[in-house]
Image (cartoon, rainbow, N blue to C red):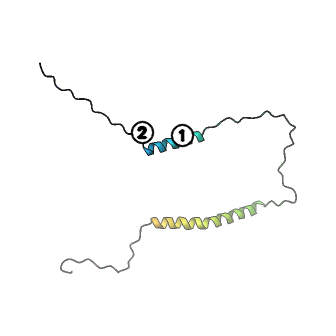
Amino acid sequence: PPSRPRQRSPKRIRRRSSSSPMLRFCLALLAASASALRVAPAARAPTVQAARAPAVAMAAAADDFVPDMQRRTIMNLVLLGGAGVPVLWLAGGYIYFLVPPGGGGGGAGVTARDALGA
């Protein structure tokens, strides 16, 4: 009988286990965030229509103190000045960290010489 050429069996593709801890963590995180974003309709109990009280007018009484525009501007400047000092201090330190050191002329280094010392 004529010999048949041996056929190669297809290579088996090895699948990664779907139970890796990272995948489980990502799926749990996705499920938790999806359930947090779900909005359920609010159940309302039937209520009897009651007479509404008149709306309260928000007006300052004659004896209440309301600062004028000049005082409000000064208060805003004091607030900005007080908050600006630490913010600028921290920003200056951050920028100073990123600036490379300068050349400086200290003179403490030794000049490189060749094999003869010249």
Mark sitting on residue 23? none
**Quick check: 10 left or right of 6?**
right
Please name the amino acid that badge 1 sits on.
Answer: Ala
**Quick check: 71 left or right of 10?**
right
Residue plotted at (70% across, 36% down): 42
Instruction: Give the residue number, with chain letter if any, for mark 1.
Output: 31
**Of residues 80 and 51, the one drawn nearer to the viewer in this rendering:** 51
Please name the amino acid that badge 2 sits on.
Answer: Ser
Asked which quadrant contains residue 22, the reply is top left
Q: Is residue 55 above or below residue 48?
A: below
**Quick check: 56 left or right of 94?**
right
Extreme residue in the front direction = 1
N-terminal label among 2 and 1:
2
Disc 2 or disc 1, which is closer to the eye? 2
Tag 2 and tag 1, C-beta contact below 8 Å: no
Q: Secondary structure at mark 2?
A: loop
Q: Give residue 13's position: percent from left, percent from top.
A: 32, 34
Q: Is residue 97 above or below residue 52?
A: below
Q: Is residue 96 above or below residue 111?
A: above
Residue plotted at (15% across, 22% down): 4
Crowding around mark 1 (Cα neighbors within 10 Å: few <14, some 14 to 19, many 20+) is few
Q: Give residue 56's position: percent from left, percent from top.
A: 84, 47
Mark sitting on residue 18? 2
State the count of labels: 2
* Quadrant including the C terminus: bottom left
Q: Give residue 105's position: percent from left, percent from top.
A: 38, 77
Residue plotted at (35% across, 81% down): 108
Q: CA distance from mark 2 to mark 1?
A: 17 Å
Residue plotted at (28% across, 78% down): 111
